Amino acid sequence: MFDPVPMSLPRLGGWERAHLLLQSRSRRALQNFLREWSQALYNLKAGAVRWHIEVDPLEF
């Protein structure tokens, strides 16, 4: 997991936005991690924080 970086439009509609890049040598390990991590994120009681997970291997 790399540090967060701002998006091309870091602030949109009053929301701060950033990217997190995750990399793995194993697609299966990455998919397992994302499944568990997404459940943990959505179960957080983080107030006004919204999460959106997008998997796009062609982007990089």
Image (cartoon, helix red, strand yellow):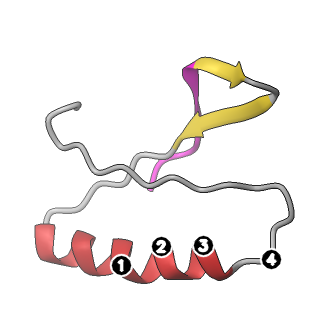
Distance CA(mark 3)–CA(mark 2) = 5 Å
* Camera-nearest residue between 59 and 29: 59
Distance Cα–Cα, label 3 vs label 4: 9 Å
The location of residue 49, given as percent across then percent down, is 76, 56
Please check the rendered image and state whether residue 2 is part of the magenta-colored stretch, yes or no.
yes
Task: State which quarter of the image contains the N terminus.
Answer: bottom left
Marking on residue 41: 3
Q: Are marks 4 and 1 in contact (CB under 8 Å)?
A: no
Gap between marks 2 and 1 measured at Cα = 5 Å
> Considering the numbered disc 3 on the image, is that residue within a helix, a strand or a loop?
helix
User: Is 5 placed left or right of 16 in the picture?
Assistant: left
Q: Spatial distance from mark 4 to mark 1, Cα to Cα?
A: 18 Å
Q: Which residue is mark 2?
A: 38
Residue indicated by mark 4: 45
Chain-order first, disc 1 or disc 3? 1
Q: Position of residue 48 (x, y in %)?
A: 83, 55
Q: Amino acid at mark 2?
A: Ser
Does the CB distance between marks 2 and 1 fall below 8 Å?
yes
- Give the magenta part as a residue range: 1-8
Relative to 2, is 1 above or below? Answer: below
Name the kind of residue labelled 3 in the image: Leu
Q: Residue at x 51, y 52 (%)?
A: 52
Q: Is residue 59 left or right of residue 54?
A: left
Is the Cβ of the residue at disc 3 closer than 8 Å to that at disc 4? no
Say whether disc 4 or disc 1 marks the residue closer to the N-terminus.
Answer: 1
Q: Which residue is tagged 1?
A: 35
Amino acid of disc 4: Lys
